Image (cartoon, helix red, strand yellow):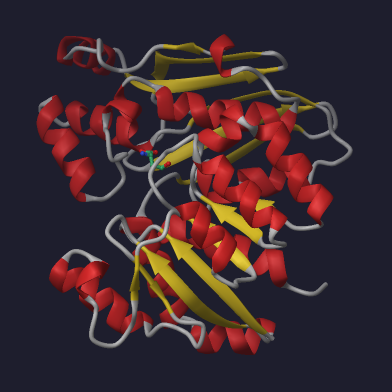
Amino acid sequence: MLISLSLLGFGNVGRGVAQVLLEKKEWFRRKYGLEFRVVSISDSSATIWDESGIDLMEALEVKKTFGSLSYWGDEYSIYHLSPIDVARKVESDVFIDVTPANPEAYKWYMEAFRMGRHVVTSNKPPLVFHYVELIQEAAMRGVNYRFEATVMAGTPIITLLQESLLGDEVDSIEGVFNGTTTFILSEMEKGLTFDEALKKAQALGIAEANPDVDIKGFDAAYKATILHNVAFEPMSFKKVEIRGIDDVSPEDIKRAKAQGNVIRLVAKIEKKRVSVEPVEIPKTSPLAVYGTSNVAVIKSDLMGEIVLRGAGAGVKETASAVVSDIIKCVKRE
Ligand code: HSE
């Protein structure tokens, strides 16, 4: 089955998705009988659009060499379309949005749903601020809205809550959901300064375009709200209590370390209550993750406790979630 994809965003994650589609093309065909054709790619400079399919290897090469798709005029036509125009005009089965955090993106998805397209995204704010409208519109149009990549990258917490544990009532979810702050705190434990650790996180491609979103706790708060919305019911972001790691000092980290503890940005999610704050925890706690790992401790009535740990950020780890969601949207049971 031939599936056409429209890819909005060609930064770290978008390129990661293109790379996976390219490298695993044969495997997707053998395993699922699916062949993917990327019919448009948009970065902030331009949209390349060709319904017969875009050469992904060359797209990656152009982006690497010139930094922007607008330089690719010789083989493909260059368009200047708004994201909403891409959603409307580009004929695709799946509209993929991997652009930086942007609440306005919900309008693009509404348009894509109206056009009968599935939406797969790593963009968190639309789920935080427009959850009900989006879920309802997708259901009404009979299409999928999938967002595994928004929380814990490819570690499947969203699918776990949406498609497993269906007989369970969740009591609480506690976890560490921001890779950048964990990375910074764990590098500071090794003696790096805050700025050195942040630069390293940026070089790994895990920090948000505006790293304040990570450091001040908003990214973790978005993720915690999404989990609340999925596990319980839609909740207003205004009610989330948020404290970032900006006031954690090297002395706090040293003192914690001397006592066998670490400091992590911990999110707590209970029905109608979500908080994010730096917490000192023993090194032996399941919440004591390192590097770019995330963890979630899910407590529910039938299962008791489930600990889910895995990558929470990273290019191929996020691409894993996006590609998996694309396949879920179109795979025949
Ligand atoms: N900036 C995010 C993080 C990326 O550090 O966890 C993954 O959502």
Residue 17 rendering spot, x and y as whole percentages:
43, 66
Quadrant where the C terminus sits is bottom right
Q: Is residue 281 left or right of residue 295?
A: left
Q: Is residue 62 left or right of residue 239?
A: left
Q: Residue at x 51, y 38 (%)?
A: 124
Q: Is residue 15 above or below residue 268?
A: below
Instruction: Indicate whether 123 appears above or below 255.
Output: below
Residue 261, placed above or below residue 211 = above
Q: Quadrant of ligand 1?
A: top left
305 lies left or right of 52: right
In percent of width and height, residue 44 lies at: 30, 55
* Total count of labels: 0
Residue at the image point whose x is 52% and y is 89% from the top: 26
Q: Quadrant of residue 81?
A: bottom left
Task: Give the percent coordinates (x, y) of residue 137.
Answer: 75, 45
Any part of residue 286 in sight: no
Position of residue 324 measured from the top left corner of the image (x, y, whole percent)? 59, 64
- Depth check, front residue: 194 or 52: 52
**Which quadrant, please, contains the N terminus?**
bottom right
Image point (56%, 59%), residue name: 87
Above or below, 132 against 205 in this view is: above
Q: Nearer the viewer, residue 101 or 288?
A: 101
| Residue 165 visible | yes
Q: Is residue 243 left or right of residue 63?
A: right
